[in-house]
Amino acid sequence: MDSASSKPQVDRRQLQQIVAGLTEGILLADPDGSIVWANETALSIHGINAVEDFGGNPAGFQKRFTLKYRNNHPLLAGQYPLARVQAGEVFRDVIIEVTKPGDDSFHAIHQVRSLVLTDAAEEPQSLVLVIQDVTGRYTAEERFERTFSANPAPAVICRLSDLRYVKVNQGFLEMTGFARDEVIGRSAYEFDVLGGSDKRDQAIEYLNEGRTIPQMESVLRIADGGSKFVIVAGQPIEVGDQDCMLFTFMDLEPRRKAEAALRQTEERFSTAFRLAPVPMTVSALDDMLFLDVNDAFVAATGYQVEEAIARDPSSLELWEDDEAFSQFRDTVESTSSVRNVEMKLRAKNGDMLDCLVSAETVTIHERRCVLCVLQDITERKRSESELIAAIETVMQDTSWFSRTVIEKLAEIRHPTPAGKTGAALDDLSPRELEVLVLMCQGSDDAKIAETLQLSRNTVRNYVAAIYSKIGVNRRSAAIVWARDRGIDRDGHVAPSPRQRRNPRGPATR
């Protein structure tokens, strides 16, 4: 008799040992709702230490814990799982949020199902709640949901079981112009995000197999009836225990428009370059090899396009003064722009052409290049030289003409731009004036350097500064300008009006 009565007790201990080791929480109650036992998992996921902390019965539980559905609606007293199982209801997979009044640090998400254990007469003997803590899963899903919704990159999620879209973010809606309810629930065949791709059949195969879909170009239908070129890729993911495919997109329209605009710009540049009436060249900045020359260059130099391409000016012996071209190149590299530098160009037949050369650095196909424009001034220089020679002949004896006549001749030769005052000798520094006087005496750069004990480069710098100040670009013009302002062939300088008004210099106190 004693052995027979002890057997059920052993069986209960074994059952409790099995239940106690489960990863799910188990809560047992009598048919009247009294909570009689819970395993360690049940206590832990409720943040308590003893079964008494559950409150003893459904009413006490409701005081200790606040339950809400996932839609944030609070459970009524009769909707609490313990009350429902006490009423004899059997349910499964109820998702609830659990908090404690007065304890803001506790928050859990539980998935609950119920069991009713009966005796031999099918009468309720024990009420069971099986509780699983799914806080981590739902928290991760919430983070994913927030990230997915906030991600500016367009994206949709397609459920693999029926190939219907279950999620869409704002980026996709803005890109296509569709409303959310026009996408959610549609099938991948109704709303085809892989249409227009030459790899569509392979992508559909990967979609059905739940495999990663590599990036490919596609054409999306948009709300206004048009289409949009995109890059689409698919990544298998799980959403709520369901296998899905995450499609992400990159809008190609801005890039296509930029490429089209670039092509139009390049076409316009090419047309303008080819038809320009003045000689033009495009060279690589690093080695100055010609990349292209226009028709006017061919006409002016006699070199055909194929003779010039991939060659540099030195190999063609294009410029008379290699040193001047080297300085020109250095200036372009350092300043990216050069304007109206006078240089002599040698045509294929040996003829020399006087040119004003301007250059600007440009980027063509991501390569730094130099665009050069050549203005042929050979005829103009010949005419100017004849005029300068005539003026110099007249000015050999200025006693024949009044100062006013000389100034009129200078004005005709170098008219002062409207709104500007012509430069005067007083605008030159003493050293610049010395260099100009020696120039008027017929000294070249070497003689000036020897006379003033300067280097030739320094003399060139002074000469360039004089040209810039008085607005000329050649030596003969500078000499005419100087003689117009009172420097004779012997280098004597007539006093300026300012000096005549104040012969002793500025007054001092």
Image (spheres, rainbow, N blue to C red):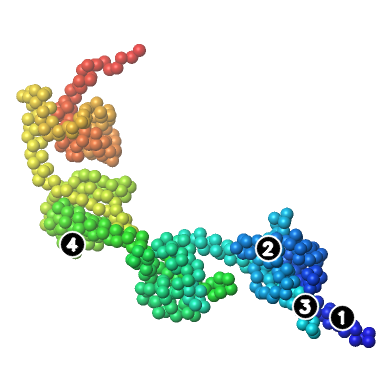
- Residue 305 numbered mark, or none: 4
Q: CA distance from mark 2 to mark 3?
A: 24 Å
Q: x%, y% of residue 73?
A: 62, 61
Asked whether the beta carbons under mark 4 and mark 1 sit within 8 Å of each other, the answer is no
Report whether 496 appears left or right of 335: left
Asked whether the beta carbons under mark 1 and mark 2 sit within 8 Å of each other, the answer is no
Residue at point 24%, 36% (across, down)? 468
Give SS at disc 4: helix
Residue indicated by mark 3: 124
Residue indicated by mark 2: 76
For badge 3, the amino acid type reads: Pro
Residue at point 53%, 61% (across, down)? 147
Instruction: Name the outermost residue toward the left.
Output: 400
How crowded is the residue under tag 4: few (<14 C-alpha within 10 Å), some, or many (20+)?
Answer: some
Residue indicated by mark 1: 9
Q: Is residue 39 visible?
A: no
